[in-house]
Amino acid sequence: MAAWVAAVRAVAWLLLGAATWLTRGPAAAFTAASSDAGIRATCSEITLRQEVLKDGFHRDLLIKVKFGEGIEDLQRCRLLIKQNIPTGLFVDPYELASLRERNITEAMMVSENFDVEAPNYLSKESEVLIYARRDSQCIDCFQAFLPVHYRYHRPHSKDGETFTVVSNPDLLMYCDQEFSILKCWAHSEVAAPCALENEDICQWNKMKYKSVYKNVILQVPVGLTIHTSLVCSVTLLITILCCTLILVTVFKYGHFSL
């Protein structure tokens, strides 16, 4: 009899615990979800815009990042842009070094053994780190500048153009103190140099953002295969003509001593 009473009491306690969980558990979950939704509602939106300047085979990639209104002081934060360079484009590391010396941009190549002379079908994708700077015309904005160049492509049989797609970059942010925007949009950490001239590694927050354009598509002119014979013939003819003129000039005006 005593064992039966104890079993009844145990079942009663279990039912009471389950009822308590059913009444409090969903409410707590709803409270947490409401709290997260409230935080998201007060988050400032991050907008990224990519633009390509200039014409021809040598372009400038301009990246602008704007934070929403009412964001905390961004003076304590740094912004790093990790840009993927497709095979149809290349970045000249010597040009970057020259631009850094003149304090025009702060960018560095991540990829090693990079060949600037290779055509697109023999090249590989590369990565560039760009340390964005504050925009003097916008208090909540950053911008980054990167010169890019077209690679030579294989000639086509019909169309005299091809397209190169520049994907949106990774946006990394590092702040000296915890800001609500990091809680809003940071979803992972990435190890990267703390500064351009610094070998120390920092843990940057990879940020979610809204892009104005899905991707940047560049139109690249290419040669036509039907023009191969014509181009080779004209090139050979001009080469022979120029060499002949050089030899005539040397023998006519040169002074030779035996």
Image: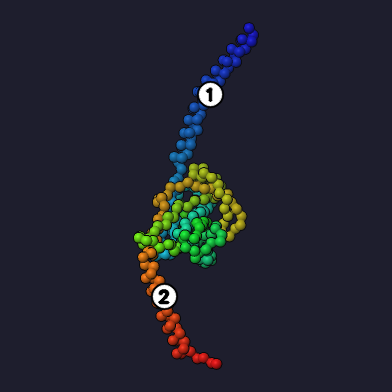
Residue 213 percent across, percent down from the top left: 40, 51
Looking at the image, residue 242 lies above or below residue 95: below
Residue 34 percent across, percent down from the top left: 47, 33
Q: Quadrant of residue 219?
A: bottom left
Report the Cα–Cα distance between label 2 and label 1: 87 Å
Residue plotted at (47% across, 39% down) = 39
Q: Which residue is mark 1?
A: 21
Q: Quadrant of the C terminus?
A: bottom right
Q: Quadrant of residue 188?
A: top right
In the displayed image of the protein, which residue is found farthest to the front? 229
Q: Work out whether mark 2 precedes mark 1 in sequence or the reverse, and give the earlier one.
A: 1
**Res. 87 mark:** none
Residue 26 percent across, percent down from the top left: 49, 27
Looking at the image, residue 1 lies above or below residue 190: above
In the displayed image of the protein, which residue is found farthest to the left? 158
Residues 63 and 134: in front is 63
Residue 163 percent across, percent down from the top left: 40, 57
Q: Residues within 10 Å of mark 2 (few under 14, many from 20)?
A: few
Looking at the image, residue 29 lies above or below residue 130: above
Residue plotted at (38% across, 69% down) = 229
In the displayed image of the protein, which residue is found farthest to the bottom? 258
Callout 2: SS: helix
Q: Which residue is mark 2?
A: 236
- Specify the amino acid type for callout 1: Trp
Residue plotted at (39% across, 73% down) = 233
Q: Quadrant of the N terminus?
A: top right
